[in-house]
Amino acid sequence: MRYDFGSDNTAGMALSAIEGLVRANKGFARAYGADEVTARAADQIRQRLDADAEVRFVFSGTAANAIALSMLAQPYEAVLAHHAAHICTDETGAPGFFGHGVGLIGLPGFSGKIDPLALQAQLGEPEVGHRQPPAALSLTQATEYGSVYTEEELRHLIEPAKALGYGVHMDGARLTNAVAAGFDLKDIPRLGVDVLVFGGAKAGANCAEAIVLFDKSLARRLDNRLKQAGQTSSKTRLLSGPMLGLLESGDWESGGAHANLMAQRLAAGIAGRSPFVLAHPVEANAVFVRMPPEAHARLNDMGWACYAFDDGSVRFVCSWATQEAAVDELIEAVAGLG
């Protein structure tokens, strides 16, 4: 089976990430994140965001998201998110588990972007004692459907939420792809995001993600929270080292740009050479195609791993490691289905 386009998690580590890990592994260093490698990686993230923020490295995006949301909402409260957001569809209730009961309220919107009118309607709902009132807004950049919020789109969602005192979380698992599509990282703190998950795994690192806290009042006893959740690494340099390698080399950005370029190539080939249509605009590194189940099954039988997504379309994901030749092979295979 060919897993080239099954997910951006199927690619291995980028060379600069491996080199960063090898460098971090040398000799002895202070434990539990007090080492120089972790400090440098955190500084690289702060510089890109142009913000003074608390940064912690954890083992997974699910843990990062769930712990971040537990800081923004009480157990009797809920988080607003797109109904197709990763926290709603792929984290097995982790936000509620880490938040001791925190709920999720799904909102509609095309291509994974929350519809501002739907948000306004939800914000206008009366609070009653029989259901969890929302206390936070979660945004995904780039979205699960490969779209990228503009600064203006984010502002129209964040400002009304902040006006009501809500906290704001951003899931940046594919943040590198949003940047490659033209998004300015410095907009994140400017817009009032309280906590960001800065993606590493899909960008070419190992399993590392970073929790970035712009609201430092949330950082009180953060390390206690991470320790209790099993997210405190004794050898944090082995988490931060690959991130440092990606960031100092610039591969965090160039890998995202390459993935986006490969997605554009794939989308153009499928649209131009097959009878199938694209289900969503291709702005980041994912391509969603409308094809009947029989065609999808044939593609799987031919050895291409690709999956039916929540809206019924078939998803193909490009990564930092996707090769042009593989894209062209897949285009030929899809064209042959017609």
Image: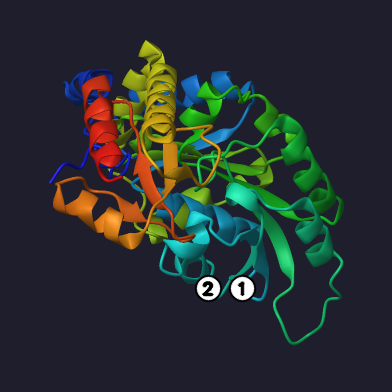
107 left or right of 7?
Answer: right
Q: Can the viewer see residue 73 in this picture?
A: no
How many other residues sit within 10 Å of disc 1, few (<14), some (14-19) or many (≥20)?
Answer: some
Q: Is residue 191 above or below residue 159?
A: above
How many other residues sit within 10 Å of disc 2, few (<14), some (14-19) or many (≥20)?
Answer: some
Q: Is residue 338 above or below residue 18?
A: below
User: Could you say which is closer to the camera, residue 247 or residue 265?
Assistant: 265
Q: Picture coordinates of residue 227 (x, y %)?
A: 39, 55
User: Could you say which is closer to the camera, residue 88 or residue 276?
Assistant: 276
User: Could you say which is closer to the camera, residue 109 or residue 167?
Assistant: 109
| Quadrant location of the C terminus in the rendered image | top left
189 left or right of 162?
Answer: left
Element on which disc 2 rests: loop
Residue shown at the point (28%, 49%) measured from the top left = 306
Tags 1 and 2 touching, CB below 8 Å: yes
Q: Amino acid at mark 1?
A: Pro
Q: Residue 78's quadrant in the figure?
A: bottom right
The residue to which callout 2 is attached is: 100
Q: Can the viewer see residue 142 in this picture?
A: yes
Q: CA distance from mark 1 to mark 2?
A: 5 Å
Q: Which mark is on residue 75?
A: 1
Residue shown at the point (83%, 64%) measured from the top left = 121
Quick one: label 1 or label 2, which is nearer the N terminus?
1
Q: Picture coordinates of residue 164 (x, y %)?
A: 85, 57
Residue shown at the point (72%, 63%) measured from the top left = 135
